[in-house]
Each structure stands twice: as C-alpha cells, then as structure tokens.
Image: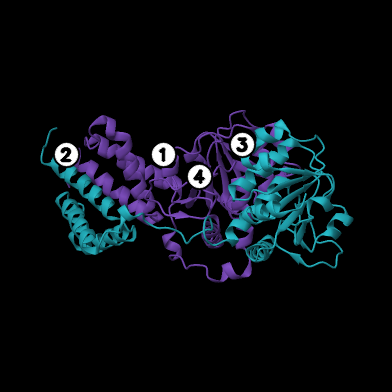
Chain colours: A cyan, B purple
Amino acid sequence: MAGTDRTLESLAGGPAIVLVEPQLGENIGMVARAMANFGLTDLRLVAPRDGWPNEKARAAASRADHVIDGARVFETVREAVADLTWLLATTARPRDSLKPVRGPKSASAELRARIAAGRPAGILFGRERFGLSNEEVGLADEIVTFPVNPAFASLNIAQAVLLMSYEWMQSGGEDGAEEAPRFAPPEAEPADKGDLHRFLDHTEALLDRLGYFRPPERKVALSEKLRTTLTKANFNRMEVHALHGVLRHVEFKLDGGQE
Amino acid sequence: MAGTDRTLESLAGGPAIVLVEPQLGENIGMVARAMANFGLTDLRLVAPRDGWPNEKARAAASRADHVIDGARVFETVREAVADLTWLLATTARPRDSLKPVRGPKSASAELRARIAAGRPAGILFGRERFGLSNEEVGLADEIVTFPVNPAFASLNIAQAVLLMSYEWMQSGGEDGAEEAPRFAPPEAEPADKGDLHRFLDHTEALLDRLGYFRPPERKVALSEKLRTTLTKANFNRMEVHALHGVLRHVEFKLDGGQE
C-alpha cells in the first residue's frame, strides 16, 4: 500500500499517529479528536480489536470525521510504518534500551524538521493495557516519554496523543502555536495619561465635595493613595470613559437630579 | 471557609482546578487523572450535576484517588474561588473581552510565579456543553485559550485540564523559575476573590441605589462591564479596603450624614 499518495498525505497531515491494537473504539475516537484539534490527520490502526469502521470511535471523535474517514487499517506494525522514514515509539518510562530518549517537545521539533524536509515520520502508541512490546519498540528509531509525575505516570492513549499533537502544533511556530500573551484588543488601547489624570482629578473633586478627605491634613496622603490605586489599574480608554460616566451620575444625583 | 489549611493546600498542590457544573462523572475522573499525572491535587467542583461523591468519577480516575478524595464541592463559582488571589478562565476562543489572553505556556509561567510567591491561584473550566458564562469569565483576571486548529477547536474538559497540567509541570523546569517577576511587597498582597466580590457587590448596590443602571434592561451588561474593569485592576487587600471606605462614605452622605 505504500506509494506517492500516501507519502504526500503523511507530509500534509504531519506525523502519522499509529495505534497498535487499540481495544476501545472510544479511545480511537478521542485520539482522532485530539489529532484534529492540532491539525494532524494521518491515523493508522494496527489490528484494532473490534474491527473497523467502529461507530463508537466515530461518536467519540466528536465530528473529527475527516480523521476517522481517513484512518487506515493494517495487520502489522511493520506494514503500518512501511512508508515512514523516521519512527518514534512512546513508552511510559525509558526502558533498558539503547535508543535515544526524547521528551515530546524535542521529539516534535525533530519530527517537524524531518517532515519539512519531505521525509514522512510517525509515532507508535501502544495498547491500553500493556503498551508496546519490546519488538515493536525495536522498530522505532527513538523513544518518546512524557514528563509525568513519577508517582502517577499512567497516561491513557488519547492523552498521550493529545500531548504529542499539541507539541507538534507548538513546534510549527506559525498557525496555532502559542503567541505572546495579547493584552488589550485594538479597541481597548490603554488610556493615555491625559485621560487618566482627568479621571483622577474628577474622582478627587467628587470625593472632596463629599467630604471624604478628612481630616484635612490627611488629604494629600489619601489622595495619593487613591491615585496610585487607580493608576495601577491600568484602565483603558473605554473604561476611563465609563468610569467618568459613573462619577457624573453620582454628581447628578447629589445635585438632586431625577430621571 | 477561607483559612490557613486551605491556603497551604492550594500552594502545595499547584493551581486549583475549578470545574463549573461538570456533567459527567467520567470527565471529572479523567480530570483527576490528568491532574495526578502532572502533580496537581487541588480539585474543586461547582455544583456537579450528578452530585458528589460519584463512583463513575472514581472509576475513570484510574487510581488518582488522592485527587478524588480531596475534591471539594461548592455551590457557586464565587465560593469556590474565594481564597484565590489570581484566577484564569479557559475559553475556546478569545471573546470580545478586555481581559488579557494567554496561551497555556505563558499562563503556567505566571501561575508558577504567583504560587511560588505564596499566592493561591486557580483556573476555571466550563461545562461540557457550553463552557463558562460571560459572568463567570468576568470573575477571572485573565483568559487562557488553547492554541488549537481553528478549523477544529473543541477540546473536551479533561483534555483542557491535561494541557494546563502538563504545562504547569513544564513550567517547573529550571529556566522558567529564574525569571520570576517580582511582586509588590508583603503588605500589598492581592485581595482574595471573596474580598473583591464583596467590594464589587458593594459598588453595584450603591450604583443601583443611585439609579445608575438605566434602562433596566441594560443593567446586566453595564454591571458586567464595571465588574470586568474593576477585576482587571487586580487591587490588593489594602486598596479594596480603602475603596470600601470610599463607598461607605458616599452612602453616609447620601443618608444625610454630617461630620
């Protein structure tokens, strides 16, 4: 089944996600969903216990139908990975193995580099119960383990795929990769200091009118504290505008205004 | 229910994971498992649909019993976050919100810095079906969104918790810790959310009394805007105390008080 089409697909869809003898359709579905969340599409199933297609898988995929529909079934791991040029095996803990061991971030960077160079690559995920056999791990070039709490290290298969898919997208930089935190959308530009100070003056005048600054010798200190508080809040222009409105309303009421 | 024990617990266990009206016990269990995988322990449930304890949750937690046993149930989000000093809300996509938006990596670094400084912090996760309400998002200081494939953005609740927990553990590595921002001196501890919400309620009650929320159908929107503005300000304990004093003074004057 190897061929051009398949190779192109592997490249477009990121690394192949290869599930070895998955037992529960629900897990396959959740794997598909996790892949779709992070832009992966090439799902390969080795001898799924309950056959294929599997309606439980489709239901659990939560509309990641393109991944479910595109999934391919193989009888053996070797057939499933035949067109790949680089293969990772996921294991719960580093085994007594001579293979290099990476974490998901470093593994994703390496996958990204290889796939960008036109070289199909994939990741093996083991059975729910007992993972991958030594022989299957032996097929891989390198091992990925997840940096989990050693006291509680069991990740389920969908979670392991999720983390790899997430790191895959992160490694891409462009699309979904995490950007620096965004502060203030364009309509919420920080108020300039002129606006802010007019607001602070307005607040102070109103509180003065209300006799808040007592005794008088405390006025400077109290006012400064209040200004510090309201400056630190880093209100944007809209917010300053709205807060002016609140102050004007209080003044209106104090003047005996009725609506 | 605020107190030393709870605060210590929040700090030892990393950020609090707060699930708002979770429906399926299975999801709660998978959340607990994901937390345990990455060393988190402080699970809080707001009005879980099927009550608590929940045997399906325990089964799905796959031996993360310490998280399940330690989970606490609250009737409202406000009660659940009352002892926290910094709160993130997870949303599927950045809303039309004036709150800062971060990805999980940056959010984890910020959580790590705050918690290392002895300041309890937490993360809100919404309902399976429709996430968090605007009002609930309004309680948070900042928003976290996940860098997912925009064409397929739905993450389930356990997956969202898994990614945050994973990044939390990642953030514990050497690099992140070194550049921890410096926070204000100890006398300027951030107000906890209980204090903040009492101040927001106080503000709203006063403005209501003054007839500020007009027309009545605008009340919810106006109040939400004001709460967002004043939450974003991240006032510390002293500041909230002083602002209460300002409100009380205005009330005193409105009641015809003379000094």
Q: Badge 3 is on which residue?
A: A62
Give the residue type at disc 1.
Glu
Are labels 2 and 4 on one chain?
yes
Which is in the foreground here, disc 3 or disc 4? Answer: 3
Rounded to the nearest whole Å, what is the CA distance between mark 1 and mark 4?
A: 16 Å
Q: Badge 2 is on which residue?
A: B256
Numbered mark located on residue B135 in the image:
1
Q: Which secondary structure, mark 4?
A: loop
Q: What is the x, y in percent for residue B170?
A: 63, 61
Left/right of residue A146 with respect to residue A95 in the rendered view: left
Q: Which of the two residues, B20 or A180, is positioned nearer the viewer here?
A: A180
Rounded to the nearest whole Å, what is the CA distance between mark 3 and mark 2?
A: 62 Å
Q: Residue at x 87, y 64 (%)?
A: A96
Which is in the foreground here, disc 3 or disc 2? Answer: 3
Classify 10 Å Cα crowding around label 4: few (below 14), some (14-19), many (20 and above): many
Location of residue A224 with respect to B8 vertically, above or below: below
Q: Which secondary structure, mark 3?
A: loop
- The answer to whether the residue labelled 3 contacts the one labelled 4, judged by CB atoms less than 8 Å apart, is no
Give the residue type at disc 3.
Ser
Rounded to the nearest whole Å, what is the CA distance between mark 3 and mark 1?
A: 27 Å
